Amino acid sequence: MTQQSSFISTRNLSKHFGKVKAVEAVNLEIQEGEFFALLGPSGCGKTTLLRLLAGFEFPDQGDIFIDQQPMGAVPANLRPTNMVFQNYAIFPHLSVKQNIGYGLRKQKLNPQDLDRQVNDALALIKMEGYGDRTSDELSGGQRQRVALARALIKKPKVLLLDEPLGALDKKLREEMQLELRALQESVGITFIFVTHDQEEALTLSTRIAVMARGKALQVASPKDLYNRPVSVEVADFIGQMNFVEAQVIDVRNGEAVLDTAGLGKITTTANSDFIHKDAAIIVAIRPEKLLLSADRQPENQDAVQGTLKTSAYLGDRNHFYVSVDGCEKPLAVAATEAEVSGEKSFDHESTVWLSWADNALILLPHD
């Protein structure tokens, strides 16, 4: 994405409900045409932040700009935004066409123009021929598409989506994720999407803000969030991660010598200012970055011996949990069938080796 002036800005944005700091000094810069996700657990402030952008709530402090225009005192119905909710919020007594065209009722369009715009919206969501159906004749996915069409027909500059796929079953949810991303690319407008589902955020978004306690902990692309989290909290929320306590023994020539709890003494790249002699840090490693084997291999790679405690077959990959002396919890290992097919069977309580490449390690400050 090319650099340009931010299309949406929040500056020191805060919203408190009594003593609860729902949103606390959030600064975001969102570009036009982005599919931007607000990701975090329940109570982290993501929905409150979305409602502040929509104008359903007003900040106690800070500013909101959309397309360089201040939104602080602008009511929801005059903002260049529209919102899609988790529960669809379509009218059961109206047909699909009537639901989609509902937002245009104040524009006093002639019947031909209204019909054309509604038909264009039906084509956009691939529901031609469904115009005369009522909501009880639609599946959950179809209802959500109708809600999307009703929001998009007014041509907002920003579409705000509050967990719009949360009410769908897993398979339909995954199908709708792909449809939603294709729809956003087709219309080209800015989508801001609230979700607690990390996989959904990684699948859909160009960038993600990970939120907790009303704050944006890190804003980055899905790939950077997964591979370069800035804190234990972010790393723990995005995917599965192993964490190991470590002490920095020495730093020299851009490398750190670490004494770890369980992985032994490690020399690795020191590329952050919190890495200095005698510092207590955390070494993180993704399960798929650990190589499980019956014997130590290769000899020149860092490795540690452990005991296999349990395993699970999940179709596309196997998950193993290995107890290592010094580690508080068993280390999780994820491997495809091909990666373990050449090995002898791994039995409960069998001795195994774990090895890893130097670039698999993520060094994090000790929270």
Image (cartoon, rainbow, N blue to C red):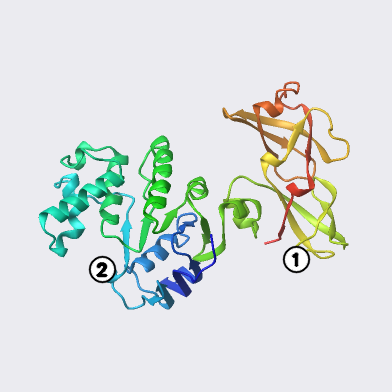
Where residue 40 appears, as percent x and y from the top left, is: 50, 56
Residue occupying the far top of the picture: 344
Where residue 262 appears, as percent x and y from the top left, is: 80, 45
**Residue 326, percent across and down?**
79, 45
Q: Is residue 32 left or right of residue 324?
A: left
Q: Is residue 216 visible?
A: yes
- The answer to whether 185 appears left or right of 151 in the picture is right
Q: Residues within 10 Å of mark 1 (few under 14, many from 20)?
A: some
State the SS at label 2: helix
Quadrant housing residue 114: bottom left
* Mark 2 Cα shell of 10 Å, populated few (<14), some (14-19), many (≥20): few
The answer to whether residue 21 of the structure is visible from this angle is no
Q: Residue at x 60, y 51 (%)?
A: 223
**Looking at numbered disc 1 in the image, what kind of residue is underneath it?**
Phe
Judging depth in this view, the residue of 3 and 208 nearest the camera is 3
Q: Which mark is residue 274?
A: 1
Q: Amino acid at mark 2?
A: Asn
**Residue at x 75% of width, y 23% of height:** 343
Q: Secondary structure at mark 1?
A: loop
The image quarter containing residue 313 is top right
Closest to the observer: 346 or 208? 208
Residue on which disc 2 sits: 77
